[in-house]
Amino acid sequence: MPIKTLVILVSKWAALVFWIALGGLRLVEAWQNALIIPALLAAQSALIAWLLITRSPQAVEAPWPQKVIAWASALLPLAMRVHRETLVGQVITGLGLLLVLWALGTLGRSFGIAPADRGLVKDGPYRLVRHPMYLGELISLAGAVTGDPTTWNVVLMLVLLLSLLLRIRWEERAVFNYEAYAGRVRWRLIPGIW
């Protein structure tokens, strides 16, 4: 077996184990504390794990710096420190997570962490904005920051925003026939703004 194939196989299984373990921890937290946000996060982790192992093959592989930034961006929300929560923050977080789950479910086999062309998805929330999963992530983290607006959380949110802007740029370049889709769906991230 070539080394590159072995590395891809090991990294795929490591990612699968990570997302399943994270989902399990979140599910335990949701069960023990009767909380909806950890339950939504557990559903998100489980869906990501499933989509990573069932996804469509990619036509072109992203350069390793893009892969590293994409994975760092995907894991960055785990560094959020939320010690206080407000009802308003929980509602905002919940709405953002529901949008993320809708976008993930719509992406289906086209989902991936690193930028790649696995087919263009134009249904569901992708009819409204071109990157609804990122919008959902930002909304959910805005809810967390609303509950605990520390310097750490605000800086983390800004770093995540910057990384998502990079991912948007790379993904729009990677997907075949993206220009036609961008002509039909005007807004990248925030309807009416950008």
Image (cartoon, rainbow, N blue to C red):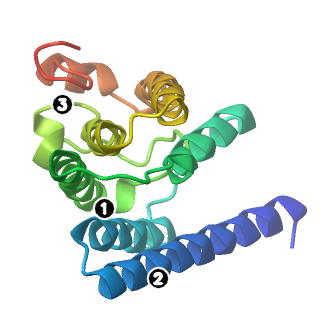
Pick whichever, 192 or 64, lies toward us: 192
User: Residue 22, percent across and down?
Assistant: 52, 73
Image mark for residue 24 = 2
Nearest to N terminus: mark 1 or mark 2: 2
| The furthest residue to the front | 84
Point 12% across, 49% down: residue: 124
User: Residue 146, percent across and down?
Assistant: 29, 37
- Crowd rating for badge 3 (residues with CA inside 10 Å; few <14, some 14–19, many 20+): many
Q: Tag 2's secondary structure?
A: helix
Q: Tag 1's secondary structure?
A: helix
User: Residue 169, percent across and down?
Assistant: 46, 21
Image mark for residue 58 = none
* Residue type at numbered disc 2: Gly
Q: Which quarter of the figure is the N terminus placed in?
A: bottom right
* Residue type at numbered disc 3: Val
Above or below, 175 against 79 in this view is: above
- Disc 3 vs disc 1: which is toward the camera? 3
Q: Quadrant of residue 111?
A: bottom left
The residue that disc 1 covers is 108
Q: Quadrant of residue 27?
A: bottom left
Nearest to N terminus: mark 3 or mark 1: 1
How far apart are labels 3 and 1 at the CA level? 17 Å
The residue that disc 3 covers is 129
Above or below, 63 against 32 in this view is: above
Pick whichever, 17 or 23, lies toward us: 23
Residue 61 visible (yes or no): no
